[in-house]
Amino acid sequence: MKRTYFLYVLLFTAGLFSCGKEWLDAQSDKALVVPSSLRDFRELLDNASGVMNNNYALLGEIGADNYYLRASTWQAASLTNRNAYVWAKDVFGGRTELSWNAAYKRVLYCNTVLQGLEDLKSSSAQQAEWKELKGTALFFRAHTFYDLAQIYAPVYSEPTAGSALGIPLRLTPSINQRSGRASLKETYERIVNDLTQAAPLLSTSSVYKTRPTRQAALGLLARVHLSMQDYEKAYAAADSALQLNPTLLDYNLLDLIGANPFLPLNEEMVFYAQLSYSSILASTSYRVDSTLVRSYAASDLRRKAFFSRRPDGTHTFIGSYSGALHFGGIARDELYLIRAECLARKGQVLEAMNDLNTLLKNRMERASFVPLSAGSAEEALRVILTERRKELLFRGLRWTDLRRLNQDGRFAVTLKRNLNGTIYELAPNDKRYVYPIPDDVIKASGMQQNER
């Protein structure tokens, strides 16, 4: 009977997020029984494909410069995808954005677990599981808040973070309160605090890549600090993460003939998550930017591992660590690149290039690999950022990189789209680097919309 009630709760929480208004205004049904045991909380957090590890925001990837569409493909896409591709001011056209709802459903699960754990007095024999569950819920909440902030909040800048608008921070499972937007500073403080709490609570390893570990929490913390341009803290977190496990995949050992050379949940992966699906980012729809493909040397195994050549000479991306869908989790290649970038920014050129070469010797043909060197911190930084661009494709990271690097004139770029001769542009630091909050959420909550 209890498990039947538990199913009712899952159905109920799923219904909350079927549209923007319900998740903000719905009244709770007191007759329903909420999860109350450690087993219940584990089942909520292990709902990997349905809620916790799926449907991370894809809008940034749609707006980024890893690919291009032909006009006919663009015309056949949904309104939201068409608008996001050309950085239109109105993206959703009044339609519901499913990834927003999926994100706050994930947050609800986390908050349900966190409150339930505080109410539950576990025995000493259960303390390890209690701590693991709390760390897991804090990690997923932080990951979700960070994911939302990359799309719906501006890039972090310390001088303006206190006055800039962040995202709604739902911190309890109550569904009776209306949500407003926290400041950008409050948003990132919450993300950092959640991850800082989560890391020591989590195990150093897990049989399941869908469950976060201490390395995953530290890796995500490094990513967060990098996006905040706090390079000292990003270095510290990445270094701590890699001290736990430095393993990389050796691409020389991969079968580079098949449709996707990477095994599911491979040994380099720290934590598994996948981005939302979009028809325009299905492999049959888009073309990878040709300049990007040409940037890989003939001896660079990523060229074969990442790209498949079409009959017309263009390329599609096949190198996802998630198989058919785009990887949105954490892997150690990213951690090496974060640590290398931070070392270069600190002027530690030799150490920075050592980290980069550790990665590259696992990406290049063994007989052809020659370690890279740099004569200055500036040169090292440029080389590392170039390799970051080439390594972390279609992971939802490029949009965040564009946003932060556009604040530095050395690395700022103007994005362009060409559709049958019509040119669309996105200038560095344009307001359209922040997506509008879905219209139904604005209508239901009354919160302030982003300027575009």
Image: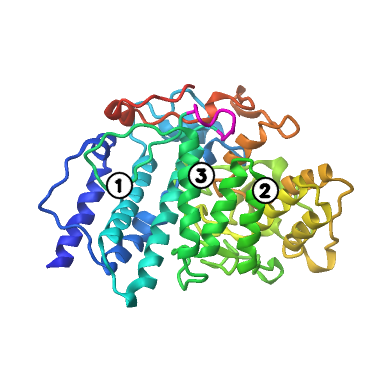
Per the rendered image, the range of residues in magenta is: 155-164
Mark 2 crowdedness (10 Å alpha carbons): few <14, some 14-19, many ≥20: some
Specify the amino acid type for callout 1: Thr
User: Which disc number belongs to residue 281?
Assistant: 3
| Magenta span contains residue 163 | yes
Give the residue number, with chain letter if any, for mark 1.
172
Q: Nearer the viewer, residue 130 or 361?
A: 130
Which quadrant would the N terminus be assigned to in this image?
bottom left
Specify the amino acid type for callout 2: Glu
Q: Nearer the viewer, residue 369 or 448?
A: 448
Instruction: Give the mark nearest the N terminus, 2 or 3.
Output: 2
User: Which disc number belongs to residue 232?
Assistant: 2
Residue 362, horizontal then vertical, whole percent: 72, 65
Residue at 73% x, 29% y is 409
The answer to whether 158 appears left or right of 206 in the picture is right
Specify the amino acid type for callout 3: Leu
The image quarter containing residue 210 is bottom left
Residue 216, horizontal then vertical, whole percent: 53, 60
The answer to whether 127 appears left or right of 408 in the picture is left
